[in-house]
Image (spheres, rainbow, N blue to C red):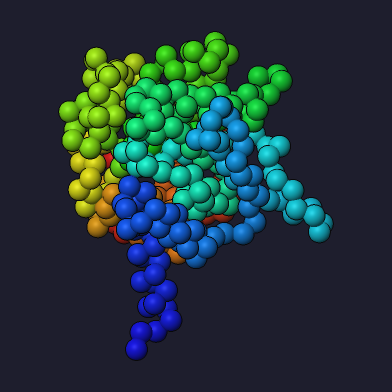
Amino acid sequence: MMSLKLILTVVLTLAAALAGGVYVYAGRPGSISVLGALFNTFVTERGVKVTNGVIYGAGERRKLDIYQSLAKTGEAASASDTDDGPIAIFFYGGSRQQGDRALYEFVGRALAKKGVTTVIPDYRLYPDVKFPAFMDDAADAYEFVARTMAMRPGGKNRPIVLIGHSAGAHMAALLALDPSYLAKRGTDMPPPAVLIGLAGPYAFDPTTWPSTKVVFSDVKDPDTARPIAFAKRGGPPTLLMHGLDDDTAKIYNMRDFAKALKASGTTVQTLEFEKIGHISIVTSIAKPLRGWAPTLQAMREFMIRHANLATDTPAISPDAAKPAVLTPQ
């Protein structure tokens, strides 16, 4: 008979695989959302204020959730959003065809507990839209964060960190490197302070790839949809992480992208995790699964160096983490 600990481990692993991979269909409509809710219930972290369903544009898919750490003042708890620390915008994956911000509550809570105000937006998906409509949504979400949360009188703005997983990493990288998206939102848009990508397809051609070509079928020049094509312009300090067991987004994407960014003079750090696949690199952010890979720890340390994250934010023990291959900055 299985022990309670083993049962919990199995449930967490199965829920993580499905909740983390939003494009994995579980059998009937709504099943992924149910599994995602189950996973988030198991891994939830307290001490976080969550503001759900904030509107940043017209339409049901243009809403976002905000996660903020709570600071105790006597018996009252209030969101500690008056500091100068970073605001992270996290874009989830799903081949631009599936996804729901609620599935990534575990990401928002984990980052908020480390002192990072975190915003997770939904964005429009195929077949309702094609590229670049979801990139416009990403830029609109960025503008909302900049104008309502980051920009302050006197010019001492809070740093904005772009984070993405899989297709979301592709979106975050394009938003960070192609200046046209933010330029359309005003000349006063602050540039992102940091880019963090998890298992992103930065170098592939989405107009020819079987699972994405229909989403990018209106693209005339494939390079307008490839982050690596903009790498020569340079970008913000960049942290790229990838699992060596990832069979979905091939690791050449990260390696080639990092090489191109470094050639431009951009500060780049890469981490390659042994025995980590496409989904586990993001679900390892959840507290019970951090022994899989030091994903959250690496993000925290990078933001301390480059995005004004306070050095006294809670640390994460790396002792149980899988070994990683590190490329120095």
Looking at the rendered image, the quarter that the C terminus falls into is top left
Q: Position of residue 95 (x, y in %)?
A: 31, 38
Quarter of the image holding residue 91? Answer: top left
Taking the spot 34% from the left edge, 38% from the top edge, the residue there is 97
Q: Position of residue 250 (x, y in %)?
A: 20, 41
Q: Nearer the viewer, residue 158 or 17?
A: 17
Q: Is residue 311 left or right of residue 164?
A: right
Q: Nearer the viewer, residue 204 or 56?
A: 56
Taking the spot 34% from the left edge, 24% from the top edge, the residue there is 131
Q: Nearer the viewer, residue 131 or 305?
A: 131
Taking the spot 37% from the left edge, 42% from the top edge, the residue there is 98
Looking at the rendered image, the quarter that the N terminus falls into is bottom left
Direction front: furthest residue: 28
Q: Position of residue 251 (x, y in %)?
A: 21, 41
Residue 251 appears in the figure: no
Direction bottom: furthest residue: 1
Q: Is residue 160 above or below residue 234?
A: below
Direction top: furthest residue: 187
Q: Is residue 173 above or below residue 314?
A: above
Residue 146 appears in the figure: yes
Taking the spot 38% from the left edge, 37% from the top edge, the residue there is 168
Numbered-mark total: 0
Quarter of the image holding residue 206? Answer: top left
Q: Is residue 10 above or below residue 66?
A: below
Q: Is residue 290 left or right of residue 214?
A: right
Q: Position of residue 231 (x, y in %)?
A: 30, 21
Quarter of the image holding residue 165? Answer: top left
